[in-house]
């Protein structure tokens, strides 16, 4: 099954290289457009599972901190490529990056976390996790979220929710720096915060023993090539998906924010499913690492990447959320802080998070 993923991806690439121009010219046929969209959507998700599998294999082989970097960067590359494909298309989309990051926050913090805690509460009544790790994630997520999605609405250098070039440059440096410090602490000094409490290493010396003493260079090279083989079809197919997505939103009159939801779903689907499986197996700490880690990497790496593309190409990017989005976002951050302020969770927290997720979906279609 693992080998089938890149094969299906590259087969799709070959078919689009041969027949794609004709298919794209016939998007006025709504049945064809819908069929192509569903096809590309499912193939990209399927291949994304292969990316996550190879990245996790490399993470185990490399140890920390390189392993976490490989896994994080693999997911972020997919996200940035999909956003860039739409941003740099002929239609352009000034709000796509904002909508995607906002959708990731809502889908992860309310959708996946809510469903997971509800499912875990029904199955296990209460679930324990490492409170220090969740608190560390939130201490980074909250300021990065405010800087990226709220602050641009209140600056006076611009009047439309965007950032000035100086602000974009300085905020990008700040974001990368803060994320880098977090990653260094997560994979080094405070690694114990991010493992289940009954599996924490005793001290730094024991942590050193847990790192791989020798790296299989041949195996490392093979899995790195396989990682690229899985990523490249997504990169190549992203332009076609972006064109179909743009056409579909314009033709149906769907809200522009729907594009962000589609991309967020594509990017986070493999990790989201893995998180739900971990919760079902009563491994809540791993699920929290997957969920909050995805949000942290989206804010810490995608925001600077999008701003860099904007500065280089001159494409306008709007980051500030509308008032209703700010209210829901701040409510989500407050609720997440309350949920992860106790070392045990119940189904009540899950039900409340899911309620906010439903509100998010309603506001997308009825703002």
Image: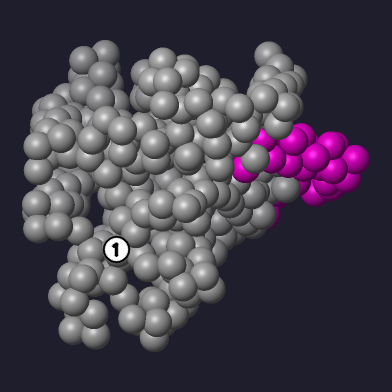
Depth check, front residue: 145 or 124 = 145
Q: Quadrant of the C terminus?
A: top left
Q: Residue at x 21, y 15 (%)?
A: 122
Quarter of the image for residue 299 reads bottom left
Relative height, residue 115 to residue 83 (above, below): above
Q: How many marks?
A: 1
Residue 197: where, in percent of width, then height? 41, 40
Q: Report whether 27 appears left or right of 215.
A: left
Relative height, residue 134 to residue 153 (above, below): above
Q: Is residue 306 magenta?
A: no
Q: Is residue 229 magenta?
A: yes
Q: How packed is label 1: few (under 14 Cα within 10 Å), some, or many (20 or more)? A: many
Residue 185: where, in percent of width, then height? 50, 63
Relative height, residue 312 to residue 125 (above, below): below
Residue 344: where, in percent of width, then height? 23, 35
Q: Residue at x 47, y 18 (%)?
A: 32
Q: Main secondary structure of the magenta part?
A: helix
Q: Residue at x 53, y 73 (%)?
A: 312
Answer whether residue 24 is visible to the viewer in this image.
Answer: yes
Q: Report whether 115 appears left or right of 358.
A: right
> Which residues are drawn in magenta?
207-235
Answer whether residue 129 is visible to the viewer in this image.
Answer: no
In this view, which residue lies farthest toward the right? Answer: 218
Q: Which residue is mark 1?
A: 319
Quarter of the image for residue 236 reads top right
């Amino acid at each position: 099954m693992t080998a089938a993923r890149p094969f299906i991806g590259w087969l799709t690439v070959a078919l689009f290289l041969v027949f794609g121009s004709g298919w794209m010219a016939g998007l006025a046929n709504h049945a064809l457009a819908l069929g192509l969209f569903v096809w590309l959507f499912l193939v990209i998700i399927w291949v994304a599972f292969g990316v996550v599998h190879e990245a996790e294999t490399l993470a185990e082989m490399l140890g920390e901190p390189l392993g976490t970097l490989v896994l994080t960067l693999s997911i972020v590359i997919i996200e940035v490529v999909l956003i860039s494909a739409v941003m740099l298309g002929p239609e352009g989309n000034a709000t796509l990056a904002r909508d995607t990051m906002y959708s990731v926050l809502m889908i992860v913090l309310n959708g996946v976390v809510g469903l997971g805690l509800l499912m875990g509460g029904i199955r296990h009544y209460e679930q324990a996790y490492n409170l220090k790790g969740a608190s560390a994630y939130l201490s980074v997520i909250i300021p990065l979220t405010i800087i990226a999605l709220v602050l641009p609405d209140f600056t006076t250098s611009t009047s439309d929710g965007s950032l000035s070039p100086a602000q974009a440059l300085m905020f990008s440096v700040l974001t990368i720096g803060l994320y880098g410090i977090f990653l260094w602490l997560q994979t080094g000094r405070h690694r114990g915060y991010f493992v289940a409490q009954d599996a924490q290493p005793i001290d730094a010396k024991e942590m050193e023993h847990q790192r791989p003493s020798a790296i299989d260079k041949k195996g490392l090279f093979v899995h790195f090539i396989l990682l690229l083989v899985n990523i490249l079809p997504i990169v190549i197919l992203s332009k076609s998906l972006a064109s179909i997505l743009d056409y579909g939103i314009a033709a149906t009159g769907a809200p522009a924010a729907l594009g962000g939801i589609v991309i967020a779903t594509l990017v986070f689907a493999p990790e989201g499913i893995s998180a739900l499986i971990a919760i079902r197996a009563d491994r809540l700490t791993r699920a929290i690492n997957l969920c909050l880690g995805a949000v942290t990497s989206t804010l810490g790496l995608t925001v600077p990447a999008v701003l860099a593309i904007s500065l280089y190409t001159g494409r306008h990017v709007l980051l500030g959320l509308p008032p209703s989005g700010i209210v829901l976002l701040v409510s989500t951050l407050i609720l997440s802080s309350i949920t992860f302020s106790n070392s045990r969770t119940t189904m009540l927290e899950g039900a409340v998070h899911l309620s906010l997720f439903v509100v998010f979906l309603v506001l997308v279609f009825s703002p």
